[in-house]
Image (tube, rainbow, N blue to C red):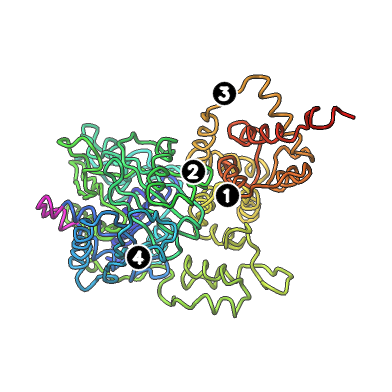
Amino acid sequence: LVIGGGASGSGVALDAQSRGLKTALVEYDDFASGTSSRSTKLIHGGVRYLQAAIFGLDREQYRMVKEALFERANLIHCAPHLAFPLPIMLPIYKTWQVPYYWLGVKLYDFVSGKRVLRNSFYISKENALERFPMLKRDSLKGALIYYDGMHNDARMNLSVILTAIRLGAKAVNHTKVEGFLKNKDGTLCGAHVKDMLTGDEWDIKAKAVVNATGPFTDSIRLMADPDAKPICQPSAGVHIVLPAYYCPANTGLLDPSTSDGRVIFFLPWEGMTVAGTTDAPTSVTFSPSPSTVDIEFILQEIRRYLSDDVPVRRGDVMSAWSGLRPLVRDPNKKDTKSLARNHIIEISKSKLITIAGGKWTTYRHMAEETVDAAVKACDLKQRNPCITAGLLLEGAHHWDPLLHIRLVQDYGLEEDVAKHLSNTYGDRASVVARLCHMTGKRWPVVGHRLHVEFPYVDAEVRYAVREYACTAIDVIARRLRLAFLNTYAADEVLENVVEIMAQELGWDKKECDRQIAEARKFINVEMGQNARMQSVSEAPLSLTMEEMTAAKQRFNLLDRDNKGHITLNDLRNHFRAHGEKIDERLLHEILNEVDLNKNGEIDMNEFFINRLARYLEQFQERTIVHVDRSGGGL
């Protein structure tokens, strides 16, 4: 029995089942609902860890990097539709850094050995700006390009689970472990679990129980052994998502030394740009939320590297999330960023096997060692040793990079939709395509988009139910990733998603309303909407009552249609009606400051806390015709 449906737990279930061991897995929420869906999306050996290994002569760190580089290559081989090599740029602004960082990335290549993805190389300032036009030009000497892997973490997690299920494992989500079953000698022999959706309860008998609950490791350990001492120190890592134009589609960026010594990645992901991460001790919670301070820290670090011509706005943050990293506690160290994500395997006196720590890249190796420990500790009879190295995951068997062309030709899908289906479902994409309804148009023939800005289609919601999606949050966050990419778009498609799920699952209106409410709460709390509203409410507002009244009058003057908001065209029409020449550059700058939620509309609150109101006031003063200039009114 495996407790936990994240990367570690699903890896253990797949490894055990592939050895011929009868395996079951239970997950309290949804598969990958915790840390495993909130990563930086990289599959990497750890450039920072290699640096620490070399300068600290740390053999353990070096071993971990070498192991991770093997797993990086293996994961890209096992799921080529979900994982791929990504060039990452390291901009250099000081001459002495050229040989220093060049040696570092070359050592990274060397440690990779024959599994190196691509060889790293140096490029000139001109080539760096051609690859990454938004870079700050001043003092730029050049850049280094090295390669790491990237993936869709939640989808990868689900693919591991689905592979285990196809091999015969039993896996259920939204199922909580209420307590353990024990033999007379105090050793575990199973667990009592509860379905969190229906309330049903039952016992699961097992010869071995594995605790793979990430940051919740200690709560399960205490349930099995009340005198257990904590071994896990959670660390919060915040990421933000920005529009695609912030980053080239084929190159990432690494800031190797932030203002407080951390590392910041700036990466293209799913048609958007993801940036992060922070690293700070935190308490365990089921609903981690990003703070305004962490979001502003990431934005400030981004501003250090991007050109001044690219204003980095708080309103450009489409989504933000916080993931709890399950770092192994070291009582001799106080800060979590000095901890490597090494994993440990503990076997308690009750025979609970706990896998703690680690990172996404090494999930397979962690699972292998965990199952080895379970076989030995619980005297399990395996059919064969570990075979997961090289084992293709769900969707990889008949996938090829040109599959999307066949989807376009065979089904009449739009090209970007076909690419999305191919890169998400692999060779199962045709199954999703067959669920698409006719559009009634000349083109596309099939495939109704859920949102005009994203390649997701309604058939994916129906297919998500077949892939164990039980709630609206399961769909918008982990099957479609829309909540992680754009909270506004996620909210806009929510009612449509719930309507489709209601048809599949037989929900009544009361359940639909509950699903919508829960999903909106998730978007607000865990996807950064509350942090955005907090940043707006905390913006300085120092207007007198007279100034506020005057500002409201100016707002209403612009909002002629009483829409409750003003647009760029409203501003243009206002200036033109008064015969004023429009300074488009200044107008653009002001709108960058004004439109905090980047929806192309300025509401009353946004109007108050920016300089647009002051600019209009100055404009109004300029357009007043004084008596002495009008010839005394005659």
Identity of the residue furthest to the top in this view: 545
Is label 4 in contact with label 3 (beta carbons under 8 Å)?
A: no
Instruction: Determine the image quadrant of residue 68.
Output: bottom left
Q: Earlier in the sequence, mark 2 or mark 1?
A: 1
The residue pinned by badge 2 equals 527
Expressed as whole percent of the image width and height from the top left, the position of residue 459 reads: 60, 63
Q: Is residue 236 left or right of residue 500?
A: left
Is label 2 in contact with label 4 (beta carbons under 8 Å)?
A: no
Q: Main secondary structure of the magenta part?
A: helix
- For label 1, the SS is helix
* Quarter of the image that includes the C terminus: top right
- Residues drawn in magenta: 53-64
Task: Give the number of marks.
Answer: 4
The residue pinned by badge 3 equals 542
Q: Earlier in the sequence, mark 1 or mark 3?
A: 1
Comparing 504 with 450, the one in front is 450
Expressed as whole percent of the image width and height from the top left, the position of residue 600 reads: 64, 47
Comparing 632 with 538, the one in front is 632
The residue type indicated by label 2 comes to: Met
Residue 287 in sight from this viewpoint:
no
Query: Residue at position x 65%, y 52% from top?
Result: 496
C-alpha span from label 4 to label 3 = 47 Å
Is label 3 in contact with label 2 (beta carbons under 8 Å)?
A: no
The residue pinned by badge 4 equals 87
Identity of the residue furthest to the right in this view: 634
The residue pinned by badge 1 equals 490
C-alpha span from label 4 to label 1 = 30 Å
The residue type indicated by label 3 comes to: Ser
Expressed as whole percent of the image width and height from the top left, the position of residue 370 reads: 23, 55
Is label 2 in contact with label 1 (beta carbons under 8 Å)?
A: yes
Foreground disc of the pair 4, 1: 4
